[in-house]
Image: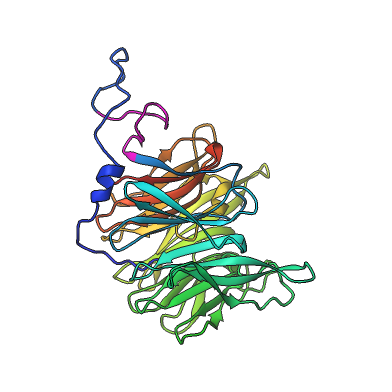
Amino acid sequence: MKRIIFITMLTMTLFLSLCSCGDDDDDNDNDQSDDDSGDDDTYIGDDDDAFVGDWYIDTVDDMSGEIDEFMHTSIDLDSLEIPHISFFDMAFPHGLRVATWQNNEWIVQRILNDSEFRGFASYELDDNDIGHMATQQIITNLGKDTYRILSHATNENGPWELEVISDNVGENSLEVGKYASLAIDIDNKMHVSCRGLIYYNNVEGAWAYQGGDTCSSEGGSGYFTSIFIDDENEVHITHGGCNDIEDCQRYVTSLGGWHGECIPDSQKTAYQSSISVDHNGVINIAYNLLFEDAKFDYYMSLNFAYKAGDNWTTEEVDPNISDNCRELSDSYLGLDPDGHAHIAYTGLDDEDNPVLKYATNASGVWVTEIVDPSPNSGIGASIAVDSEGYVHISYYDNGNSSLKYATNRP
């Protein structure tokens, strides 16, 4: 996940063309509920503008079908705060694509066309605006047997190229590289966590195993990992794992010596998590928990934990979210310059349809809202926060078979 680097230059001219705020193209003089001054759409398509309330929503790429499990999006901002998005084709065989906003339009590039991927692409730009991605790659040998490896992709030399991080298949040939998450340190070195929980980096040049976290339960550890490197190059990872007694949301770090612990009040089945650390060293983690009620029905909740010093504080953000939150990226949590949290996730509307929702504690309390009310939107969401605290979200809209981008940048 992205280190928090806030720049002071104002570079959002591009969004003046991307987001022409203040128009109200849905004016209706015969409708008294239309105020004729602000955008009061209730869904995309009310008119010919792209606003729903305060949110600008744009279709990045039209596709066909529905996205497969675990093929989430991943968004990052370059040094000019221009959004870059990695994502997968919705149709089989789910090739990789990268989209960038250039010359007032989205430029979509299909990359690594000769390779096959299972998913879990975690995308980030280094300080030179070079793209890097950790992903689970599918390999088919001469005997037509398939197995999976953990790979690193980059366009450092121009075209996108792949290199192997780990092909240590062993007995779990389908698990290698699962739940991959990538972060870049202050020296532009790569760090990757994945199912296991296993942690690799290339600090010394070659990719090497650096440690992990064990779990005694049958399910094991390293579910839905998320990694972050702080300003001191310390490693912070969160994942679904366990202690000696029960399953929980785990936090593992190199700070003070490699060690891990369970987040308090997280003793349930943990799904996708996302981690970030502010400039004061406060650890912030968003995570989903699975519950079973008295009628044996299952539901999921969105939760948040932060650790200042030695003390954890846990909070429930949204008590009932879509189970599609299993498909969120490893970067659905971002922090603004003041350390406030911003979360993009797959929530539920009043009719229990999955929709893109947004939560923030910038006001001092958690506030949630629907961003894109299109049914079956918000799948695979990823978030980036710019230097002025505005958010940028990438996600799939399964109902309209498209990749979308949303921002509250005025």
Q: Who is closer to the viewer here, 103 or 259?
A: 103
Residue 286 is situated, as x and y percent measured from the top left of the image, at 45, 58
Residue occupying the far left of the picture: 9
Q: How is the image coloured?
A: rainbow
Q: Quadrant of residue 24?
A: top left
Q: Is residue 293 above or below residue 82?
A: above
Residue 358 x, y percent position in the rendering: 40, 46
From this viewpoint, is residue 169 visible?
A: yes
Counting from the top left corner in percent of width and height, residue 100 is at 39, 54
Residue situated furthest bottom in the rendering: 204
Which of the two residues, 364 or 113, is positioned nearer the viewer here?
113
Judge whether residue 378 can be spotted in this image. no
Q: Predominant secondary structure in magenta?
A: loop
Of the pair 359 and 191, the residue shown nearer to us = 191
Residue plotted at (35% across, 67% down) = 129
Quarter of the image that includes the C terminus: top left
Q: Is residue 172 above or below residue 402?
A: below
What is the total number of numbered labels drawn onto the structure image?
Answer: 0
Q: Is residue 265 left or right of residue 80?
A: right
Residue 383 point in image, percent of width and height: 41, 54
Tell me: residue 1, above or below residue 372.
below
Residue 53: within the magenta? yes
Query: What segment carries the magenta color?
Result: 38-55
Residue farthest toward the top in the current orientation of the protein: 30
The residue that appears at 80% across and 70% down in the rendered structure is 143
Residue at 26 percent across and 37 percent down: it is 21
Of the 4 image quadrants, the one containing the N terminus is bottom left
Q: Quadrant of residue 276?
A: bottom left
- Tell me if residue 335 is in the magenta stretch: no
The residue lying furthest to the right in this view is 143
